[in-house]
Amino acid sequence: MTFDPQSLRYDAKGLIPAIAQDHQSGEVLMMAWMNAESVAKTLESGRVTYWSRSRQAFWVKGESSGHVQTLVEFRFDCDRDCLLLRVKQVGPACHTNRRSCFYTVVDAGEEVEVMAPEF
């Protein structure tokens, strides 16, 4: 069956959450938003392309930072309303220069940073 990006379930703003996961380690790197066109661009180019809500523009991961995400596998959940992008990540995934955006843990009611910036 041929995949159609329009077959996914987008929210009222035409967006769908996309979770980026390292294809080798399984580490969750980040979450961002995509629309049908950014899904299509990602599948066509192999370079992960998100939709920036703040800039209202496409955001090719690593275009300005060099911290590129190359698509290895594109998955969606059973409800078709969330994406899992298994990627090859070059450099940090987070804009804070950490490997993952998920670097804060709540431990005994306190926020604890468990990952330092890479540089």
Image (cartoon, grey):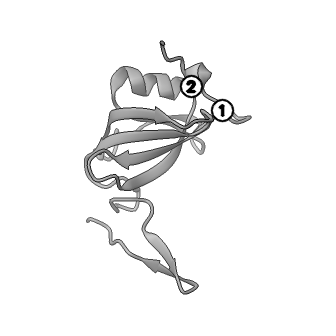
Q: Amino acid at mark 1?
A: Tyr
Give left or right: position of 107 versus 115: right
Q: Is residue 43 visible?
A: yes
Label 2 CA crowd tier, 10 Å (few <14, some 14–19, many 20+): some
- Residue 40 location, x and y as percent? 47, 22
Tell me the CA gap for discs 1 and 2: 8 Å
Please, which residue is most extreme toward the top here?
2
Q: Which mark is residue 36?
A: 2
- Please tell me in which quadrant of the rendered image residue 82 appears: top right
Q: Secondary structure at mark 2?
A: helix
Point out the tag, 1 or 2, that comes first from the N-terminus: 1
Q: Which mark is residue 57?
A: none
Q: Is residue 68 visible?
A: no
User: In the figure, 8 relative to 106: above or below?
Assistant: above
- Residue 47 location, x and y as percent? 34, 31
Give left or right: position of 108 versus 23: right
- Please tell me in which quadrant of the rendered image residue 60 appears: top left
Residue at the (40%, 56%) spot, across then down? 94
The residue that label 1 is drawn on is 10
- Please tell me in which quadrant of the rendered image residue 72 appears: top left
- Residue 51 location, x and y as percent? 53, 36
User: In the figure, 60 relative to 54: above or below?
Assistant: above
Q: Are marks 1 and 2 in contact (CB under 8 Å)?
A: yes
Residue at the (26%, 52%) spot, across then down? 91
